[in-house]
Amino acid sequence: MVRKAATGNSSCTLTLPIPEPNVSANPSVVANSSGNEEFRRVPLERIIPNPQQPRQHFSEAALQHLAQSIRTQGVLQPLVVRQSGAEDYELIAGERRWRALKLLDAEDAPVIVRNIPDEAVLEVSLLENIQRENLTPIEEARSYRQLIEQYGYTQEVLARRLGKDRSTIANLMRLLHLTSPVQNDLESGRLTVGHARALLALPDETAQLHLRERLLRHGWNVRETERQVRTWLTRLPQAAKSDDPHSGSSSKPSTRLRPEIKALEDELARILGTRVALTYQNGRGSLRIDYHSLEEFERLYERLIGS
């Protein structure tokens, strides 16, 4: 099926490689065998964006690139919509293609019309975007949180529905504990997920923002960021002790700063991805592992028991 849409003084050919129906009362409609969805070509002006669209950021450069691809190759994947009123359609999946078609001044678009209930709209949008790797990590994490808070999913059920490990979902949702500037850096691409996970080990927003500023100024890679975080964490217990008014000069010297103890702390903090405090004296000691949410506790539990 081929159509042309004017773009200034030029034209573009939009081709959809879907076979024409053998029999149809309406040549613009092709129903599938299950009756739950059908193929149509509908006017772009009748398609309404999805208010629950998980994707919040649309790169203008990426949209221009997609529009050029559609200009030369056509729309290779139909948009997914559901009926909204008598003549309108709510966009469920494919907003990037819809926006690119608008850039080309196309009149209509190939769509798959599905019968999707309200409670499934976000899930379908999330699944489609995850499979196409179009969401940023923060957008994906926010979508998981929305599914859990609005629709009563657990991480386990969500993992099964999306075909992912529960730990993958839990680790992504941990990114929402980052300060807003760090989350913005992650969304814009200034920082990677590896940088963000390293900063998550810091105990508070002040520490996150301080190391974020140094990270961006010096251009640290992930390994250097992890090293700097470990250095910061090993200094915290000693700094807290020096600020404690109840710690007098008569107290016994701490053995926590012995090189072998510091090395063990560093290694445990690196493996667990959180702050670790290890004390040892006269053959006895304690190990403290910090966590800041139930999801982080579950992640640490799984790591410790080896699941």
Image: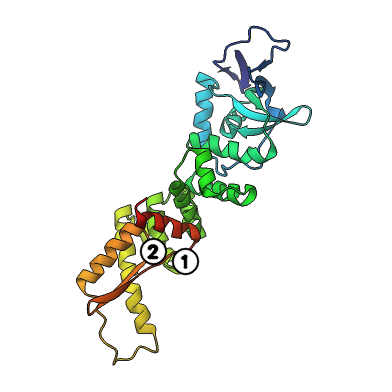
| In-image side of 228 versus 141 (left or right) | left
Residue 221 visible to the viewer: no
The percent coordinates of residue 18 (x first, y second) are: 57, 15
Q: Residue placed at 42% from the left, 55% from the top?
A: 299
The percent coordinates of residue 288 (x first, y second) are: 36, 70
The furthest residue to the top:
22
Q: Residue placed at 61% from the left, 52% from the top?
A: 149
- In front of the other: 122 or 88: 122
- In front of the other: 304 or 105: 304
Is 130 above or below relative to 181? above
- In front of the other: 53 or 299: 299
Quadrant housing residue 229: bottom left
CB-based contact (under 8 Å), mark 1 and mark 2:
no
Q: Secondary structure beneath disc 2?
A: helix
Q: Earlier in the sequence, mark 1 or mark 2?
A: 1
Q: Which residue is mark 1?
A: 205
Q: Is the N terminus in the top left, top right, bottom left or bottom right quadrant? A: top right
Amino acid bearing label 2: Leu
Q: Secondary structure beneath disc 1?
A: helix
Q: Residue placed at 59% from the left, 39% from the top?
A: 123
Quadrant housing residue 24: top right
Amino acid bearing label 1: Glu
Q: Which residue is mark 2?
A: 211
Graded by Cα atoms within 10 Å as few (under 14), some (14 to 19) or many (20 or more), the crowding at tag 2 reads some
